[in-house]
Image (spheres, rainbow, N blue to C red):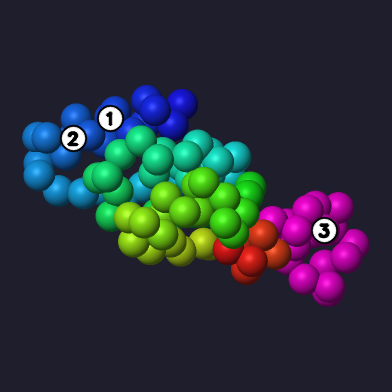
Amino acid sequence: MAKAVAATIDEAYQKTGKKFILVTHSQGGNPGWETVKYTDNIAAIVAIESGAAPVVGSEDYQAMLQNNIPVVFYYGDYIGEEFSDVPVSEMWAMMRSMAYDF
């Protein structure tokens, strides 16, 4: 999937001459991190409620550092101790923690 996204970005770059902002969502975040390894035409990544973040020191992480790609994470509600009664709050807290580590 990441290679296909990279190929699409490269094709659009050839037509416009401009790098692209890659927007990912939820589990689509993982292929987004990998896409950076297959193209030099990503200007930034916007990760909306990302299901994961690259582990510091990983190949995906290193590719973003080498290409100097800024990343912003956005998470919705139900994260925090005050939402312990919401079944998915613990999962989102773990995902947000991964983003903080990143």
Does residue 76 appear in the picture of this structure?
no
The residue depicted at 75 percent of the width and 62 percent of the height is 93
From the image, which quarter does the C terminus lie in? bottom right
Q: Nearer the viewer, residue 55 or 17?
A: 55
User: What's under tag 1, amino acid-wise?
Assistant: Thr
Looking at the rendered structure, the secondary structure element under dot 3 is helix
Mark 1 vs mark 3, foreground winner is 1
Q: Which residue is mark 2?
A: 12
The region drawn magenta spans 76-95
Instruction: Specify the quadrant of the image occupied by residue 92.
Output: bottom right
| Amino acid on which disc 3 is placed | Glu
Disc ID at residue 90: 3
In whole angstroms, how far apart are the C-alphas of marks 1 and 2?
6 Å
Q: Are marks 1 and 2 in contact (CB under 8 Å)?
A: yes
Comparing 93 with 53, the one in front is 53
Q: Is residue 92 magenta?
A: yes
Could you give the CA–CA distance between mark 1 and mark 3, rounded to whole angstroms? Answer: 36 Å
Q: Reply above or below: 96 against 22.
A: below
Expressed as whole percent of the image width and height from the top left, the position of residue 32 reads 46, 42
Q: CA distance from mark 3 to mark 2?
A: 39 Å
How many neighbours does mark 2 have within 10 angstroms: few (below 14), some (14-19), or many (20 or more)? some
Amino acid bearing label 2 = Ala
Q: Image check: 24 left or right of 58?
A: left
Q: Is residue 68 above or below residue 15?
A: below
Marked residue nearer the N-terminal end (1 or 3)? 1
At x 36% / y 31%, what residue is drawn? 5
